[in-house]
């Protein structure tokens, strides 16, 4: 019985994967046909904007669905308790690198990572190591990497991952060396190290159960962010169709030295996730903006959003929040300048 059920799930997965590949390959032709059907052409700003929107919305949603499903299955092998157990007792440096790397494979946004932040401190994970995870989880996650790979290729995705990990590791080490545990809220200080790291591991699951978890992650995460994707692609379509190329190059080009810090300052008050902001990044690049500048903008939106700061205020005192924001913003600006220098 179990074997029959497993074979049905694997058969369904294979058929869905083949259908995904087929549909993904038809997106460009589908967008061309629809734009032509309404009597528009790429020569018109609205035609170009409409093509961008029709092509990018299903493309981003399909990429996101595939990645979230796979990472949902992966997540059944890695529980929060196991993650805490892996990080507790680690030395500075080693712990920061491990925490930042674990942030890649844990599908948490900046807001949902805060409860884990508290759990890590409670399990005895050092403050700086915990911050490395908090920075990495929303900024260098599998969704961002998959979308960057799909839109810009492996070189950009790899460089983004390496630079993002570097920001998370160094920022965590700096915060750890400042010994700012007394700037946690008092109730959080009392929780620090109050319980040993959990030894719980994910329950043994058959593959059908793991696939159900993957589908559950798709419903939860894609269901939560699809609106951001549509809005982000809509904004990107407007930029793509109507903003003159020379205008963006003059504001965000390589020759404008102040564009990177300005992009970070603009990005902080905004709130989005990788899925919502990457289409905007793509449109800005298509209009002549420098890669480093738009990457700095993207990182600041994801890792230093105003809603995240409001949630962090529940567990951190203002001085520690200011240090966190300052260290991460400095790292992001460095990434922007490096991208502009190398690419």
Image (cartoon, rainbow, N blue to C red):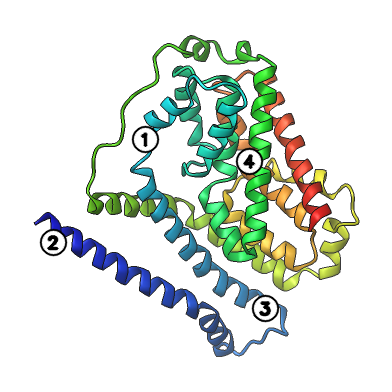
Query: Which of the two discs, 3 and 4, sits closer to the camera?
Result: 4
Q: CA distance from mark 1 to mark 2?
A: 28 Å
Q: Quadrant of the C terminus?
A: bottom right
Q: In the figure, 256 relative to 235: above or below?
A: above
The CA span between labels 4 and 2 is: 43 Å
Element assignment for label 1? loop
Secondary structure category for the residue under label 3: helix
What residue appears at the point 57 percent right and 52 percent down from the top-left corner?
A: 144
Pointer 4 residue: 165
Q: Name the residue beneath numbered marker 2.
A: 4
Q: Along the polypeptide, which appears first: circle 2 or circle 3?
A: 2
Residue 138 % position (x, y): 56, 42
Mark 4: secondary structure: helix
Answer with mark 3 or mark 4, whichever residue precedes in sequence.
3
Report the side of 215 relative to 26 (left or right): left
Mark linked to residue 79? 1
Query: Of circles 2 and 3, which is in front?
Result: 2
How crowded pointer 1 is (Cα within 10 Å; few <14, some 14-19, many 20+) is rated as some
The residue depicted at 45 percent of the width and 18 percent of the height is: 122
> Quadrant location of residue 236?
bottom right
**Residue 230 horizontal side relative to residue 219, left or right:** right
State which quadrant residue 81 falls in. Answer: top left
Q: State the separation of the CA atoms marked 2 and 3.
A: 49 Å
């Amino acid at each position: 019985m179990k074997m029959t059920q497993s074979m049905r799930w694997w058969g369904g997965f294979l058929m869905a994967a083949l259908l995904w590949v087929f549909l993904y390959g038809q997106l460009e032709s589908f967008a061309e046909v629809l734009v032509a059907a309404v009597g528009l052409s790429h020569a018109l700003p609205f035609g170009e904007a409409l093509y961008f929107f029709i092509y990018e919305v299903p493309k981003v949603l399909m990429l996101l669905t595939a990645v979230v499903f796979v990472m949902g299955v992966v997540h059944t092998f890695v529980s929060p308790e196991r993650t805490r157990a892996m990080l507790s007792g680690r030395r500075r440096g080693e712990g920061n690198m491990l925490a930042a790397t674990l942030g890649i494979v844990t599908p948490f946004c900046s807001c949902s990572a805060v409860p884990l932040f508290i759990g890590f401190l409670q399990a005895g994970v050092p403050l700086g190591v915990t911050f490395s995870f908090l920075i990495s989880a929303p900024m260098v996650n599998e969704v961002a990497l998959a979308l960057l790979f799909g839109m810009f290729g492996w070189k950009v995705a790899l460089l983004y991952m390496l630079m993002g990990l570097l920001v998370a590791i160094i920022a965590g080490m700096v915060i750890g060396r400042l010994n700012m545990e007394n700037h946690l809220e008092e109730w959080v200080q009392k929780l620090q190290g109050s319980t040993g790291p959990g030894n719980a591991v994910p329950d043994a699951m058959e593959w059908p159960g793991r696939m159900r978890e993957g589908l559950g992650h798709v419903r939860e995460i894609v269901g939560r962010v699809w609106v951001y994707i549509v809005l982000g692609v809509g904004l990107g379509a407007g930029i793509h169709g109507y903003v003159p190329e020379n205008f963006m190059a003059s504001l965000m080009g390589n020759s404008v030295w102040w564009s990177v810090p300005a992009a970070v300052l603009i990005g902080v008050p905004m709130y989005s996730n990788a899925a919502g902001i990457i289409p905007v990044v793509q449109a800005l690049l298509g209009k002549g903006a420098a890669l480093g500048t738009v990457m700095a903008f993207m990182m600041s939106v994801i890792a230093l959003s105003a809603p995240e700061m409001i949630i962090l205020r529940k567990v951190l005192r203002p001085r520690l929040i200011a240090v966190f924001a300052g260290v991460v913003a400095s790292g992001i600006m460095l990434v922007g300048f490096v991208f502009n220098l190398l690419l």
